[in-house]
Structures are given as C-alpha cells and as structure tokens.
Amino acid sequence: MEVTKASTPKENEQKGKEQDITFATPKAPFPECLRSSSLVPPFGKKLARMDEMMELFKQVQINLPLLDAIRQVPAYAKFLKDLCTTKRKLKTYIPKTVHLTEQVSAVLSNKLPPKLKDPGAPLISCKIGNLLIDRALLDLGASINILPSSVYDHFRFGELKPAEVTL
C-alpha cells in the first residue's frame, strides 16, 4: 500500500502550522492480471511440450494416411487441432531424422493388436454326478450360495423354506 502525505492550505492559515493528512492508495490484489495479454504465451505452461510435438510433426514421413496415425494418438490430434486454430510463424531448423518412441513407432508400423469386443460372461459346462449343466457361470472366487431351482429339484433335497435375503 502506498502512503501519500498532503497538507490543506486552510488549516495552515488557521493554525499557523502545517498539518499532514495521509492518503492510502491500495495495490492491486492480483497484479499479474493487469499485465498485457501479449506478454503471456498462447499455450501457457504447455508451450515447451507443444514445441517438442511440433518438432516431431516436422520430422514425420510416413506412407500411410496421416489422419489414421493421428487418430490413434490423442495427444497428437489435440496438438494438430491447436496448430490449425492458432497462427504461429515457424522460425526453427527442421532436422532430417528423428527417433520415435515405442508407442508412436508401433502406430506407424501397424503393429498394434486389433481391438476386440467384450467377451461377455464366463460360462463353463459343469457335471455333478449324472447331472450335466451346459452353461454354468464361472465363479472367480466369490462366495455366493445360490443354486438354480432345477438343480435343487434334481437332487431332491426336500421342501424349501422361505427366507428373506438381500443380495
């Protein structure tokens, strides 16, 4: 906070001496907001990473369609979109070769495994004595004591008693 001292002429004449009056000027609570927007880079803290990606794009030479490769790497798709929407001048040297990461190399050489759909519920066939159950749900360690009524009837355990259970 800045403090400024001033004296009023009327009081100087009346009392014959100078009286000081203090005026306080508050500072801006967030001075960085007052800076010119031209001083702030367009991508903020991500500028260095964007420059690295720009360098990588300058060096890419592939025979498969570029859009297919970009679609498989989401970070590159976002960077390319930023390049198309923001005008910038290129003033840097473009090297002839570049070392690719394993992920990008796999995308460009089409060595990625194919995407598969959900296999569904794990079903197995089960035989208990003479009873064969073709599609029994595979239990992977859960302890749930539920028996289909057809299996219960087949083993003739007796009459069922009603019970209230919450699953």
Image (spheres, rainbow, N blue to C red):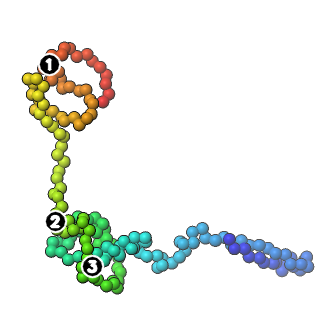
Quadrant (top left, top right, bottom left, bottom right) of the C terminus = top left
Distance (Cα) linking label 2 and label 3? 21 Å
Q: Earlier in the sequence, mark 2 or mark 1?
A: 2
Q: In the drawing, what numbered circle is on residue 155?
A: 1
Helix, strand or loop at mark 2: loop
Residue that numbered label 2 is attached to: 110
Q: In the drawing, what numbered circle is on residue 128?
A: none
Q: Nearer the viewer, residue 124 or 18?
A: 124
Task: Give x and y (percent) for residue 35.
Answer: 53, 76
Q: Residue at x 16, y 63 (%)?
A: 111
Q: Is residue 5 above or below residue 137?
A: below
Residue 84 visible from this viewpoint: no
Residue that numbered label 3 is attached to: 58
User: How many residues crowd mark 1 within 10 Å: few (<14), some (14–19), many (20+)?
Assistant: few
Quadrant (top left, top right, bottom left, bottom right) of the N terminus = bottom right
Q: Earlier in the sequence, mark 1 or mark 3?
A: 3
